[in-house]
Image (spheres, rainbow, N blue to C red):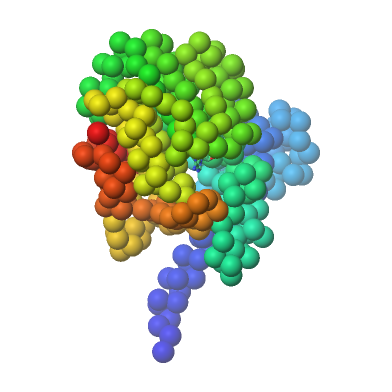
Amino acid sequence: MVDETKLNEFIGKILGDLGGVFSAPLVRMGDKLGLYKALKEQGPMTPAELAAKTNVAERYAREWLSHQAASGYLEYDSVTGKFTLPPEQAMVFAEPDSPVYLQPAFDMAAVMLENQPLVEPAFRTGKGVGWGNQSQCLFCTTGRFFRPGYQTNLVASWLPALDGVVAKLERGATVADVGCGHGFSTIFMAKAFPKSTFVGYDFHPASVEQARVHAERHSATANTKFEVALAKDFPGKDLDLVTFFDCLHDMGDPVGAARHVRQTLKPDGSWMIVEPAAGDKLEDNLNPVSRMYYAASTMICVPTSLDQPVGAAFGAQAGYAKLSSAITEGGFRKVRKATETPFNMVLEARP
Ligand SMILES: C[S@@+](CC[C@H](N)C(=O)[O-])C[C@H]1O[C@@H](n2cnc3c(N)ncnc32)[C@H](O)[C@@H]1O
């Protein structure tokens, strides 16, 4: 027997969800066409003013602005006919350095849609989809998606949460940043600790190329290098610190990676593993952040791992118990959760 009240509540929720899905291309265009930026810089504007400022057609500007107002992304004043980007919404859509800059999450939604023709057949075969074969906007989107979190937390709170690591970095340490992607994490650390040397490793050659470009652009080449290598056999020795940012769960063989990291570290070295925030059980993860992670995990992380030898497919919501047991199995004696944010947990492993 259908409960009318529950049905209506659920329809209300689905309408909200569909509104979000429908909004994805509009939010992305708002970014690409500079519409949010103009609204942030200029303040309240009519469609004609926004169109003139951003060199777009007025009719399109008006429809886009109407959608944004209906979404609660902009405020509309019916007396002046002007639209405003409130400061809170600006942090989400128009301030790349804000800790809650979520615009790239809409690009991630596009990546997942583009991955569907690859992942759907994999559901039948159980096979993986190689990282490098997935949607071509995956790589820069991943970098942009994680960058604000790293910019806010990495140097300010994550590294200080590790035992004695900041003092070593200040004196001059050797660091490998494995699975570095486009290298934002590597570059943030390199800029903060100029006496230390950093090598970023990733198995995806095009990402390593881009990381080199970013290092040039941010004048970080003096103490960074980027090389193509697998987590299981990157060429490090006597390292003070190895870092893995949002990638251990993507790997086919996290235990094999742990074993190799153990061999590359000094006896008093540290391994920092940044992973998506997650509880150990599904019932702990039935919330909006985990919902997004499970979606990305199904469309990106699980296929990536299943494509590699071993194919452990931890998924993006592996949780502390599973991650720490892989780390211990790889030969580390001590593991702890050093700190966490609503989006990430930071683990520290010691030999
Ligand atoms: C979700 S991305 C994270 C990238 C980057 N650390 C960041 O936080 O922006 C995962 C990265 O792990 C890399 N990766 C996956 N499996 C790998 C492996 N077995 N060895 C080395 N890199 C790997 C991918 O190429 C990709 O760059």
At a point 40% along the width and 76% down the height, the residue shown is: 6
Residue 60: x percent and y percent?
74, 44
Q: Taking the image as drawn, is residue 118 in sight?
A: yes
Residue 115 shown left or right of residue 246 in the figure = right
What is the quadrant of the N terminus in the image? Answer: bottom left
Q: Is residue 188 above or below residue 339?
A: above
Q: Is residue 75 above or below residue 4?
A: above
At a point 76% along the width and 35% down the height, the residue shown is: 56
Residue 20 shown left or right of residue 151 in the figure = right
Q: Looking at the image, which is closer to me, 59 or 76?
A: 59
Residue 248 shown left or right of residue 225 in the figure = left
Q: Quadrant of residue 162?
A: top left
Residue 281 shown left or right of residue 210 in the figure = left
At a point 76% along the width and 31% down the height, the residue shown is: 55
Q: Taking the image as drawn, is residue 184 in sight?
A: no
Q: Quadrant of residue 104?
A: top right
Residue 2: x percent and y percent?
43, 85
